[in-house]
Amino acid sequence: MRKLVVSEWLSLDGVFDADTMKQWFHPYDSEDRQERITDLVLASDAFLFGRVTYEMLAGYWPNVKNNDKDDLEIANRLNSSPKYVVSSTLKQAEWSNSTIINNSVVKEITGLKQQPGHNILVFGSATLVESLMDADLIDEYRLLVHPIIMGSGKRAFKDGMATTKLKLGETTTLSSGVISLCYQRAQN
């Protein structure tokens, strides 16, 4: 059975908003941080997105060329792998190998997890992640926590979400002060 892995990049106070990324994301970039991201993408052979994240990434990754060597491995994996976007409003998904899931979401994702293969990776997509948490479909959380407190912005995990118990699988301090955390679903 495949694992459903959620990847979030966030500030210490949980902000993951793309509109504030220049303040908390770029200053803490490092070679070992990029390696973590690349390894996570390459360990996955299917990708699951909410509509907003899908549209943001679909506007970038198909356009990465051979001269963007740092991004080329990620672009090749994302562009060639199956991508699933959960949306009730998106009518057409033009990024190669994309499928829209617009009903029976839990059943469809449960079916994807039962197929043979490697990890199914979810980037960002806070609303989708909340739904996946409610359905108890997430196996692992991979967080890159940046050493900055934003004070405001869109949070990855918002107030009112169900309590979810996790167990720490791994923690690594990266050269820029970013903490890489891996949590797995705790067995009751």
Image: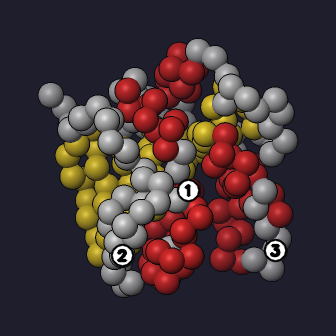
Quick one: label 1 or label 3, which is nearer the N terminus? 1
Residue that sits furthest to the front in the current view: 152
Give SS at disc 3: loop
The residue that appears at 36% across and 75% down in the rendered structure is 148
**Compared with residue 147, is residue 136 higher up or lower down, i.e. above or below?**
above
Count numbered badges in the picture.
Answer: 3
Per the model, the C-alpha gap separating discs 2 and 3 is 33 Å
On the picture, is 115 further left or further right than 101? left
Q: Position of residue 29 (x, y in %)?
A: 50, 80
**Compared with residue 105, is residue 43 higher up or lower down, i.e. above or below?**
below
Q: Identify the residue position indicated by label 3 in the image.
A: 66
Q: Identify the residue position indicated by label 1 in the image.
A: 41
Per the model, the C-alpha gap separating discs 2 and 1 is 25 Å
Q: Identify the residue position indicated by label 2 in the image.
A: 148
Quick one: label 2 or label 3, which is nearer the N terminus? 3
Give SS at disc 1: helix
Q: Position of residue 127 (x, y in %)?
A: 51, 38
Quick one: label 2 or label 1, which is nearer the N terminus? 1
The residue that appears at 32% across and 67% down in the rendered structure is 12
In the image, 115 versus 133, the foreground residue is 133
In the image, 102 versus 40, the foreground residue is 102
- Three-letter amino acid code of the residue under disc 1: Val
Is residue 166 shown to the viewer in this render?
Answer: yes
**Compared with residue 44, is residue 42 higher up or lower down, i.e. above or below?**
below
- How many C-alpha atoms fall within 10 Å of the one at disc 3: few (<14), some, or many (≥20)? few
Res 71 quadrant in image: bottom right
